Amino acid sequence: MIRHKEAMELVKDTLAKEQKKGSFALTIITGNSSVLQQRIFNEILEDSPFTFYVPGWNLGQIVVEYIRL
């Protein structure tokens, strides 16, 4: 388990690396932390080029997709 600050940095870094490679889909595991999930939405994903959703079958994860045209 990692702290929110470390998780936020890891998400930012991973998304940046994957975006440089091209199109991708990945899953971010947030577990039961709705606070972390909301921070990821607000601080990273909201104004980004990525599409994202929380699947109804597992509310403890965020699926992020990016398609380079």
Image (cartoon, rainbow, N blue to C red):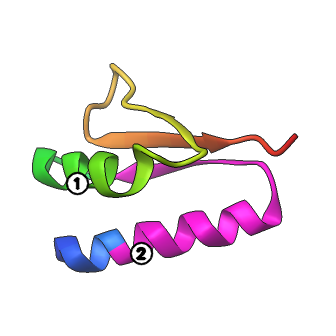
Which label belongs to residue 10?
A: 2
Q: Which of 56 and 5 is in front in this view?
A: 5
Q: Do the residues labelled 2 and 1 touch (CB within 8 Å)?
A: no
Asked if residue 20 is among those painted magenta in the image, a careful observer would answer yes
Badge 2 marks a residue whose secondary structure is: helix
Asked if residue 53 is among those painted magenta in the image, a careful observer would answer no
Asked whether, in this view, residue 65 is left or right of residue 29, the answer is right
Magenta: predominant secondary structure element?
helix
Quarter of image, res 36: bottom left
Q: Position of residue 60 (x, y in %)?
A: 26, 41
Q: Label 1 sits on what residue type?
A: Arg
**CA distance for labels 2 and 1:** 13 Å
Instruction: Give the residue drawn at x 76%, y 41%.
Output: 67
Using a 10 Å C-alpha cutoff, classify the residue at mark 1 as few (fewer than 14 neighbours), some (14 to 19) or many (20 or more). Answer: some
Using a 10 Å C-alpha cutoff, classify the residue at mark 2 as few (fewer than 14 neighbours), some (14 to 19) or many (20 or more). Answer: few
* Residue beneath disc 1: 39
Badge 1 marks a residue whose secondary structure is: helix
Asked whether, in this view, residue 34 is left or right of residue 31, the answer is left
- Position above or below: 15 against 58: below
Q: Where is residue 57 in the image (x, y as percent from the top left)?
A: 34, 22
Instruction: Give the residue drawn at x 39%, y 26%.
Output: 55
Q: Position of residue 58 (x, y in %)?
A: 31, 30
Of tags 2 and 1, which is closer to the observer?
Answer: 1
